[in-house]
Image (cartoon, helix red, strand yellow):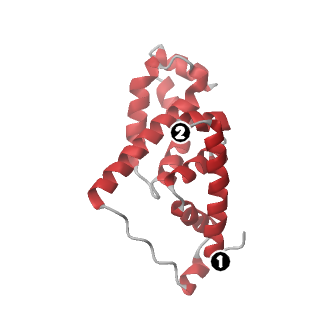
Amino acid sequence: MSDELLIVRCQLGERDAFPELVRGWHGAVDRYVRRMLAGPDDDVVQEVWLAVFHGLPKLRRPERFAPWLFTIARRAVTNRLRDSYARSGPEPTEEPAGPDESDAIVDREVLAEALGALPVREREVLLLFYLEDLPLEACAQICDVPVGTVKSRLNRARRLLREELTRKEYEV
């Protein structure tokens, strides 16, 4: 069933439609939140779904659900980051893994670490464009910037990611 139809069903008050919509999109939201916050945060994911539940009746263009959903997720992540920065101040930098530890790291973990080292804006466009397969226009709408800015952030993000992986002595 298409997302558009599910959204219309939700807006009409059909009880089974919202859980079905959540099942279809929960993985993407959870992945986005986890990667933006460098770890899982069920509270933020729950906050996203609560905002979706309350805002869904006002969504006028069901075909624009994905950008709308990720805009809500972005706002929740930004609020969490703002709160954590205000509480703890600057985060301590992590020590690079020693040679014995690096042998045990799986490629996925190396990539996740490298992504986590990127500035938030660059990490965000990489996640949205490459991992969530959203078009440039949707990324621009979610980030509330022009498409050209998304392109330049993607370019910078790819360069920074390559440098980070090279710094970790990972073959790029």
Can residue 134 be seen by looking at this rendering? no
Secondary structure state at the residue bearing disc 1: loop
On screen, 3 above or below 71?
above
Q: Residues within 10 Å of mark 1 (few under 14, many from 20)?
A: few
Does 11 sit left or right of 66 as displayed?
A: left
| Percent coordinates x, y for residue 139 in the rendering | 60, 38
Disc 1: which residue: 169
Secondary structure state at the residue bearing disc 2: helix
Residue 55 picture quarter: top left
Residue type at mark 2: give it: Cys
Residue type at mark 1: give it: Glu
On screen, 112 above or below 86?
below
Does 156 sit left or right of 76 as displayed?
A: right
- The residue lying furthest to the bottom in this view is 100
Which is more toward the observer, 151 or 128?
Answer: 151
| Percent coordinates x, y for residue 148 in the rendering | 65, 40
Can residue 84 be seen by looking at this rendering? yes
Q: Which mark is residue 143?
A: 2
| Percent coordinates x, y for residue 77 in the rendering | 42, 46
| Percent coordinates x, y for residue 33 in the rendering | 47, 48
